[in-house]
């Protein structure tokens, strides 16, 4: 094993043989920080490119600079000293050819190092991350002789190529510089740090991948594709409870319906909607004018028939012929008595009273006052507030296999934090139009024992639970229904 003195000597020897590290003073660090801040504050890609090719001169001296975008087929997007580059200009076309040659040379270089011509040094081994690559016209003779031939017409002697890469390490263009003096290690170090900042800033303006590209990347054959397909297959067979929503209302259960006892016109309602009433409380009254007239006529006919029978009985004592008329007078009297009794009973039924206690359920009293009604027509309902049920209207389009005994939950609109559970008792076999004009099935459900305090007349939305189905059926149920309606299969 090497002793301590031998290790120290080896370390000193390696330090002496290593190339000198670049020295950066405080002023250069301040400029580097300022240019980095300017890159982060750029409002657009063009503004960032203009800042790169023009304002970097304060940190690293150069005569020419250009920013080359790496998108296919690649083009020069910014040139120093010009507000906007003309792609048809000869100088810009030569820069395009130069940057393409440099980018291809970078791609073909070994992945772990790149050559750099630095003053006072030969080819140096650089880190794996993109570094500044210095070059001259002689370096382009082999790969781009036509570019090297025109070098002296456009550029000074020394050039520097700073490649830019995205977060994944893919080439995203680069920045090229030129000047008369050779590039130093300090210049290369400063430009390398700026290149990292610029590449990150350009990434913010890069176009986002579309959903098709993302989907194509996910479905690319490989481990990710297999995982996605297995996850989708498992998700498709996960059992879910099939549920539908339907408008619902708390309605009275087994209510007493109050009907009109006679044909007539409602004269007055003695109760108000939702008013509690007791047995014998007057509910409404019909107009008695016609019946009172008929009763007066019947009373007059009865008195007349009674007087005629009395006179005939007196004459029958002495006149045998008059005695024969007594039977006819007696029948007429009985007929008038029946008419009088019938009219009296009808007149007594003009005022309707409650036959049981409950709450009067009906619409606006003004809609009934003066309205002509027929015998047996429904006027109002007497309901027991403690004996209610839930009535839901299940639209035909959302119909599922609902059977008696299925659970139902009512979410009233007037109380968003409350809910009431119920059990379905019956489902109508035939759909009927609702007041809103929607064809739906009537569903009746009994509230749970602890939910009997649900307010009568509360309206809301009922969630009706159906059978357990696979997730794929739950998702595709409606699209398949619409497809069958359109395609007829």
Image: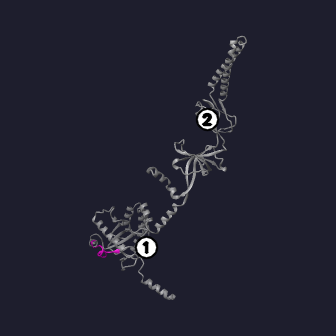
SS class, disc 2: strand
Please check the rendered image and state whether residue 137 is part of the magenta-colored stretch, yes or no.
yes
Of labels 1 and 2, earlier in sequence is 1
Q: Which mark is residue 33?
A: none
461 is higher (above) or lower (below) than 34: above
Q: Which mark is residue 25?
A: 1
Q: Nearer the viewer, mark 1 or mark 2?
A: 2
Asked whether the beta carbons under mark 1 and mark 2 sit within 8 Å of each other, the answer is no
- Of residue 195 and residue 398, the one placed in the foreground of this image is 398
- State which region is magenta: 134-146
Taking depth in this image into account, of 383 and 84 the one nearest to the observer is 383
Answer with the quarter of the image where residue 211 lies: bottom left
Residue at position x 52%, y 47% in the image: 396
Q: Which residue is mark 2?
A: 379
Q: In the rendered image, is residue 25 in sight?
A: yes
- Binning the other alpha carbons within 10 Å of mark 2 as few (below 14), some (14 to 19) or many (20 upward) gives some
């Amino acid at each position: 094993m090497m002793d301590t003195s031998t290790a120290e000597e080896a370390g000193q020897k390696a330090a002496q043989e290593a190339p000198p590290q670049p020295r950066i003073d405080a002023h250069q660090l301040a400029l580097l920080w300022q240019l980095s801040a300017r890159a982060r504050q750029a409002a657009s890609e063009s503004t960032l490119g203009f800042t790169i090719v023009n304002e970097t001169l304060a940190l690293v001296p150069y005569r020419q600079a250009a920013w080359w975008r790496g998108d296919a087929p690649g083009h020069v997007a910014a040139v120093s000293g010009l507000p906007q580059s003309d792609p048809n200009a000869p100088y810009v076309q030569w820069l395009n050819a130069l940057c393409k040659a440099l980018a291809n040379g970078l791609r073909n270089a070994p992945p772990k190092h790149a050559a750099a011509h630095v003053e006072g040094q030969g080819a140096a081994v650089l880190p794996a991350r993109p570094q500044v690559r210095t070059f001259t016209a002689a370096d382009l003779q082999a790969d781009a002789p036509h570019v090297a031939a025109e070098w002296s017409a456009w550029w000074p002697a020394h050039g520097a190529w700073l490649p830019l890469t995205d977060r994944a390490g893919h080439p995203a263009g680069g920045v090229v510089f030129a000047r008369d003096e050779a590039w130093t290690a300090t210049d290369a170090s400063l430009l390398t740090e700026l290149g990292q900042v610029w590449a990150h800033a350009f990434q913010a303006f890069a176009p986002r991948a579309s959903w098709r590209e993302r989907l194509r990347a996910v479905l690319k054959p490989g481990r990710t594709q297999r995982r996605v397909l297995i996850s989708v297959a498992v998700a498709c067979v996960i059992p879910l409870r099939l549920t539908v929503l339907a408008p619902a209302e708390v309605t009275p259960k087994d209510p007493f319906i109050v009907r009109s006892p006679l044909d007539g016109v409602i004269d007055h309602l003695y109760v108000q909607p939702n008013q509690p009433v007791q047995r014998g409380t007057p509910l409404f009254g019909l107009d008695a004018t016609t019946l009172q007239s008929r009763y007066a006529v019947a009373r007059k006919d009865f008195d007349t028939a009674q007087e005629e029978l009395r006179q005939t009985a007196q004459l029958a004592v002495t006149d045998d012929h008059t005695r024969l008329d007594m039977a006819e007078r007696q029948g007429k009297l009985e007929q008038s008595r029946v008419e009088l009794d019938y009219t009296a009973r009808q007149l007594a039924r003009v005022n309707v009273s409650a036959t049981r206690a409950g709450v009067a359920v009906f619409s606006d009293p003004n809609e009934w006052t003066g309205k002509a009604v027929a015998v047996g027509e429904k006027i109002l309902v007497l309901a027991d507030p403690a004996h209610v049920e839930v009535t839901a209207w299940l639209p035909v389009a959302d119909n599922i296999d609902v059977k008696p005994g299925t659970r139902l939950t009512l979410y009233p609109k007037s109380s968003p934090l409350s809910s009431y559970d119920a059990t379905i008792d019956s489902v109508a076999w035939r759909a009927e139009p609702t007041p809103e004009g929607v064809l739906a099935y009537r569903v009746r459900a009994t509230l749970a024992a602890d939910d009997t305090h649900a307010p009568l007349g509360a309206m809301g939305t009922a969630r009706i639970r159906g059978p357990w189905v696979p997730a794929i059926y739950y998702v595709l149920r409606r699209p398949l229904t619409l497809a069958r309606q359109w395609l007829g299969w």
